[in-house]
Amino acid sequence: MSSPDSPGMTTGEVLKLIGRSLRLAWPFRLQIVVKLVLALIGATVVLMLPWPLKMLTDHVVMKMPVGTSPTPYPPYVQPLLDLVADMSPLGMVWCFLALAVVGIVLIGAFGTDAATSDSAEGNVAEGFDTATRSENQANVSNSRVGGLLGLFEYHYQLRITHRINHQLRALLYQHLLCLPITRFSDLSIGDAIYRVMYDTPSISRLCYDLLVTPVVAIYSVGVIIWTTHYSYSAVPSLIATAWLAAPIVLLSTILGTHLARRRSLVSRQAGATTTANVEEGMSNIAAVQSLGASASQRAAFANASAESFRGFRRFEVLNAIVVGFQGVVVAGLAFVVFYDVANVIIDKRMSAGDYAVLYAFFLQIAAITAGLGALWFLLQNNIAGMKRVWDIVDLSIDAEQHDARTLPAPASHVRLDGVSYTYPDGTIAVDNVSLDGRVGEMIALVGATGAGKTTLAYMLPGFISPTSGRVLIDDIDARELQVDALRANVSFVFQEAFAFDDTVANNIRMGHSAASEQDVERAARTARAFDFISALPDGFATRLGRAAATLSGGQKQRLAIARGLVSPAPILVLDEPTAALDPETENALMEALQAERQKRLLVIIAHRLSTIRTADRIVFIDRGRIVETGSHNELMANPNGAYRRFVDLHTGAVNS
């Protein structure tokens, strides 16, 4: 689908899209709050980890009395300091050893390096394209710590991620199912699959990156800045670094956000094109092989696949530039800070143990500020994904074109009152057609290809609405009826028979999920499908496989007719129901349909005379208008009539 994916978005549109996405996650707000609390606990633990090492260095190795450190301990460390205040150096070692064991069990680590390196996360294998990386986004979960706490937080977040992603996938898929049937003429199935599978995971990453990550980052940076003011005012450059690191890194990303969003949209669209190529090639594999088009299809896929990778690489190159700039900034700050720290330690205004704390804090603030800086930049990728999702959700569905009325009883009468239909390009498909039919009748719509027969039939179940005129069901405008109420009264059997990868019985039951085994069997008999179904390995329990490739065209068509017949709808529309049938099966089917016409209004679109001639009324359509109406004999009695010429062309009488 081409139109909705325009990459240009204003800042206001981006913020509106973000707000809309977050509202979708509102039902999971309590779970997200719990995740936030767990993340804050993990961040607090990480901030505490360097202090035991300072105490060991200063009070055990350097043998400084507790309480004589040249830099004051912050208040949040005071309980730990009080715990070891009266211990001997050896006692302190054993105490911290016990704390280390507890720390390894609870958070998977202990010490300075653990403050930055230990975490709990899991990822599936991924490649350098948006699609495979979206698999990780669909299962995103992590924790700042490891151990039991990290494991619990990881699994808790994973459940939230799956629930949020499932809700959005279900919403998008449901919306796709409710789109007008004509919409799928310009909507690639591969693109739709890509949006459902690979664009929807953007929602969970968006939630965490906006609701959890910034809060935890600001909390951690705030504690570090406060600690540097409280304990390390002797190093002014350290305080300045703590204050300036985040703004400098953030500034490096803001300027590239628009370009990042554009490149992400292009990458996703290229990935969707690749998926569409696979779907179209495999769906039409017989045609590809029979026409010797394998090479051209392979080339088309190769080009689409290469473009998909190129698109993602362009996004990653931009990301690498930003990360590289951030690395230069961090390296420069590190040089300045640790040069000053070394001088202060030499001057004994700080202890050797303070170096461990500052080292851990610097690594934390560098990682946090780099993460914050990259946050808005990387957010553009998820914004692009959500834009593609909302572009589909915003498309008008059939239900929006209808009101909420229902029919008090099954429909008995249909009337088309001066209906016309014009396609968006201005082509007139149906022009001022009036027609009525009642249950107990069989009406045949006849005419040349492109005359407007199927377009007219599409109005009955509300697949399309007339641009002018009305479709009346028991004298109620179809647009006033609920879509479900309308389609419960109109069953449609399409010219192109389709089948699902399910049992034969369930394929037939698709037209009426509550149908009993007897109903399914009765419909199969009427559709003249019972014999070939009985010959299948497991009869009605036989699974057909993808696209029912083991069935012939005629068998699939009879299966589709049975699906329509099992429906209790009083109006049954059959579009070329006998096109794939041999004459003997066709005659048997038309004979069986005579019983159905007693309890239904049958509307049949057909070209075969054997199908047409048994109809109560034949409606001949030419260029969107009704030219003639009558029974076969009545219309044949007019030697200059359009139907007579149509019959003569089919029988060869025009040449005699």
Image: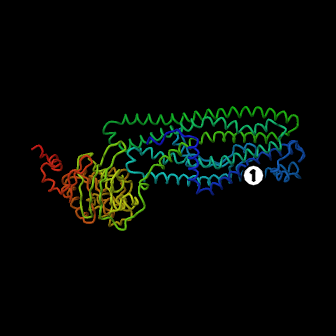
Label 1 crowd (10 A; few <14 / some 14-19 / many >=20): some
* Residue at image location 53% in from the left, 46% down from the top: 386
Left or right placement of residue 294 versus residue 368 in this view: left
In the picture, the quarter occupied by the N terminus is top left
- In the rendered image, the quadrant that contains the C terminus is top left
Point out residue 544 in the picture as x, y percentages from the top left corner. Answer: 36, 54
Residue 353 vs residue 192, the one in the foreground: 192
Depth check, front residue: 595 or 351: 595
Instruction: Specify the color scheme.
Output: rainbow
Count of labels in the image: 1
x, y percent for residue 364: 72, 42
How far from the left and from the top, in percent, is residue 344?
85, 35
Left-right relation of 378 to 505: right
Looking at the image, which is closer to me, 466 or 63? 466
Q: Which residue is mark 1?
A: 101
Relative to 109, does residue 538 appear above or below in the rendering? below
What x and y, as percent, mark residue 311? 51, 35
- The residue lying toward the viewer, choosing from 315 and 115, is 315
Q: Secondary structure at mark 1?
A: helix
* Placement of 216 over or under 480, stated as above or below: above
Image quadrant where residue 528 sits: bottom left
Type of the residue with mark 1: Val
Which residue is at the far left? 656
